[in-house]
């Protein structure tokens, strides 16, 4: 539901925004006029928008996982220099 519900809401808003500007009866597919009923075009486009937004949300959740969950271990500790180490003269 963390993916499907937000995608559903945004798909509804996107549907309203797109069809506020475009007339479904003026759409063409492969150069041919689409002669489907308006409701069919609204429905199909809504499900396409919803599927694409769910894919986007799922990808975002997958990429936001911590490295421990992905790799099975934490990042190794940083290597620390010895306590008596001093930088070379050129770096001072």
Image (tube, rainbow, N blue to C red):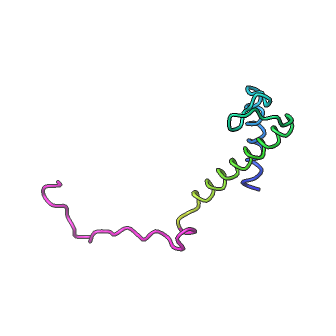
Q: Which residues are magenta?
A: 68-92
Q: Position of residue 23 (x, y in %)?
A: 78, 27
Q: Main secondary structure of the magenta part?
A: loop
Q: Nearer the viewer, residue 4 or 19?
A: 19
Residue at the limit of the structure toward the bottom, as seen here: 72
Q: Position of residue 81 (x, y in %)?
A: 28, 69
Q: Please, is residue 17 above or below residue 1 in the view? A: above
Residue lying at 79% horizontally and 31% vertically, measured from the top left = 24
Residue 29: quadrant of the picture: top right
Please state which of residues 36 and 66 is positioned toward the viewer in this rendering.
36
The image quadrant of residue 16 is top right
Q: Is residue 22 above or below residue 42?
A: above
**The N terminus lies in quadrant:** bottom right
In the image, is 47 to the left or to the right of 53?
A: right
Q: In the depicted view, which residue is nearer to us: 44 or 52?
A: 44
- Confirm whether the magenta stretch covers residue 42: no
Residue at the limit of the structure toward the front, as seen here = 32
Give the quarter of the figure containing the C terminus: bottom left
Farthest residue toward the left?
89
Residue depicted at x 78% and y 39%: 12
Q: Count all numbered tags in the image, as a single digit.
A: 0
Give coordinates of residue 85: x percent, y percent.
22, 68
Instruction: Give x and y (percent) for residue 56.
Output: 64, 50
Q: Residue at x 77, y 30 (%)?
A: 19
The verdict on residue 77 being magenta is: yes
| 56 sits left or right of 5 in the view | left
Which of 55 and 70 lies nearest the eye of the viewer?
55
Q: Residue at image x 58%, y 68%?
A: 69
Against 11, is 33 above or below? above
| Above or below, 28 relative to 65 | above
């Amino acid at each position: 539901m963390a993916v499907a519900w937000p995608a559903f809401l945004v798909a509804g808003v996107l549907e309203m925004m797109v069809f506020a500007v475009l007339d479904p009866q003026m759409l063409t597919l492969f150069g041919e006029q689409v002669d489907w009923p308006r409701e069919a075009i609204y429905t199909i486009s809504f499900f396409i928008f919803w599927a694409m937004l769910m894919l986007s949300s799922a990808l975002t959740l997958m990429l936001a996982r911590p490295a421990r969950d992905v790799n099975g271990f934490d990042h190794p500790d940083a290597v620390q220099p010895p306590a008596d180490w001093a930088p070379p003269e050129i770096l001072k």
